[in-house]
Amino acid sequence: MKSIHFIINPISGAGNNQISESLIRKYFSSNQFEVSIFYTKHKNHATELVKNSVMASASIVVACGGDGTVNEVASYLVGTNIALGIIPGGSGNGLASNLNIPQEIEKALLLIKKEHFSKIDVGRVNGNYFFSNSGMGFDAQVIKNYENSNERTIIGYLKSSIKALKEYSTNEVYEVHIDGQVINCKPFMVFVSNSNELGYNLSLTPKASLKDGVFDVLIVSKISKLKILIFGLLMLFKKHESLKEVHYYAAKKIIVKNVEGDFIEYQLDGEVKKEKSNIIDYEILEKSLIVIC
């Protein structure tokens, strides 16, 4: 009998996660599946729960929540034979959207039951895994503002972006190594992506793929606030690469150094991290995570 574990974040999406035990058992009957259901109680609790699932030799572990919950669960499944399922329950749901996983809970459950498996690439930076994207500069400031707000909606994201625009100043000097090529810059943004979806159907790297073995890298040079607004409008139509300040690369290995500082602050799958070192090192792990999509 196949063992399937559900790890549910009950407060994802501002507490609107409507998945229930009765609904799960409606799709996964006890005569076909051995179902276990767990609820997270605090940040990083999903990591503890998925460790137990791996030890219990679960066949599938389903992350029910937003990108943060998915990252916690998926990070412990990298390199294993255990498949990741996703029931989107957050605000952005970037990875789920990229994998064409339905937003509707019942459709997502039905997809998991069909068990269509695929292997995807995984990013790793200074020992931390990511599945969608990572960035520093303006991108990280937007996420930082969003984390500090109480609005988990596209409006909240827009307000966070406006606040970041008001606060914007580019002082940090970065040295970016892209597969050996060295770029010195004082950027508006450095963005490293494994997928073509930010969430909310927005994309900075529309050509990116979870299965091509490379990162898509966007470096945006220092620009005026007017150009930032133009950049944002062009992004809605996936035309932002037309700006001369936007530089696009594909690479397997990226190293970013904060030349004049002793730390780097960046976002990783929508969570802000502050690295004590002034160097962060990106590498891609090809087809190292099994997903249901």
Image (cartoon, rainbow, N blue to C red):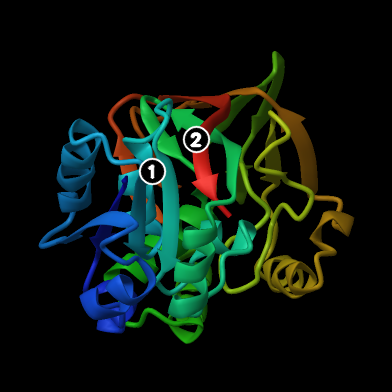
Nearer-the-camera pick, 41 or 100: 100
Expressed as whole percent of the image width and height from the top left, the position of residue 149 reads 30, 76
Vertical placement of 210 versus 65: above or below? above
Report which residue position mark 1 lands on.
74
The amino acid beneath tag 1 is Ala
Report which residue position mark 2 lands on.
289
Q: Name which of mark 1 and mark 2 comes first in the sequence.
A: 1
Mark pair 1, 2: CA separation: 8 Å
Answer left or right for 6 relative to 225: left
Nearer-the-camera pick, 218 or 71: 71
The amino acid beneath tag 2 is Leu
Vertical placement of 279 versus 129: above or below? above
Q: Which mark is residue 38?
A: none
Residue drawn at x 31%, y 46% is: 1
Residue drawn at x 45%, y 78% is: 106
Nearer-the-camera pick, 57 or 185: 57
Residue extending farthest to the front is: 31
Nearer-the-camera pick, 183 or 120: 120
Label 1 crowding class (10 Å Cα cut-off): few <14, some 14-19, many 20+?
Answer: many
Vertical placement of 150 versus 287: above or below? below
Q: Is residue 101 visible?
A: yes
Q: Is residue 162 visible?
A: no
Answer left or right for 182 relative to 288: right
Label 2 crowding class (10 Å Cα cut-off): few <14, some 14-19, many 20+?
Answer: many
Answer left or right for 53 relative to 108: left
Residue extending farthest to the top is: 180
Expressed as whole percent of the image width and height from the top left, the position of residue 7 reads 25, 58
- Looking at the rendered image, the quarter that the C terminus falls into is bottom right
Expressed as whole percent of the image width and height from the top left, the position of residue 81 reads 42, 30
Answer yes or no: do the residues labelled 1 and 2 have beta carbons within 8 Å?
yes
Element type at mark 2? strand
Expressed as whole percent of the image width and height from the top left, the position of residue 120 reads 59, 38
